[in-house]
Image (cartoon, rainbow, N blue to C red):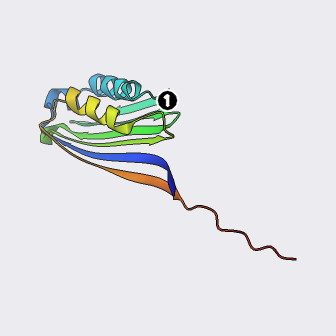
Amino acid sequence: MRALGRHVLAEVYGCSFEILNDIKKVEEIMVKAALEAGAEIREVCFHKFSPQGVSGVVVISESHLAIHTWPELGYAAVDVFTCGERVNPWDACRYLTEKFKAADVHATEIERGVIEPPQAAAVNL
């Protein structure tokens, strides 16, 4: 069996309020995290909520990085999904948690698109 992609889901705690509430900083960190992992960026879209919080996505050729922040809680929910062998989602995750000044991170990896080897096809004669 092989997987089409790797999806890291990270619960990021104890982050800087100022960083998590600054759309420009969050976007910059997420873009640089994608580049640190070796990804090729296609599109970037971020939104600032009132009174606080940022959500955004960095679309990469290999899939995406997404974030939703709760600055008042020092918390960010982060997804880093990559396809192929070239990009390591953990590199992006490590970079962004360092830049968010996270005190604690709980992350897990899920294999996406696990493909079973094809069964021998029956032949109708």
User: Residue furthest toward the bottom?
Assistant: 125
At 43% across and 31% down in the image, what residue appears?
Answer: 45
Q: Horizontal and vertical percent for residue 3?
A: 49, 52
Taking 72 as reference, is 76 left or right?
right
Q: Is residue 107 left or right of residue 13?
A: right
Instruction: Please name the residue that numbered disc 1 is placed on.
Output: 43
Looking at the picture, which amino acid does disc 1 mark? Glu
Q: Quadrant of residue 92?
A: top left
Whether residue 44 is visible: yes
Quadrant location of residue 118? bottom right
Q: Give the quadrant of residue 19.
A: top left
Q: Is residue 121 above or below residue 25?
A: below
Label 1: how many Cα within 10 Å (few below 14, some 14–19, many 20+): few
**Residue at 34% from the left image edge and 28% from the top image edge:** 33
Q: Tell me which residue sits at (26%, 33%) in the image.
A: 94
Residue 87 image position (x, y, % from top left): 44, 34
The answer to whether residue 62 is left or right of residue 16 is right
- The image quadrant where one finds the C terminus is bottom right
Residue 31, position as x, y percentages in the image: 38, 26
Q: Secondary structure at mark 1?
A: strand
- Please state which of residues 114 and 123 is positioned toward the viewer in this rendering: 123
Work out whether residue 48 can be spotted: no
Residue lying furthest right in this view?
125
Tell me the residue at 69%/68% (across/down): 120
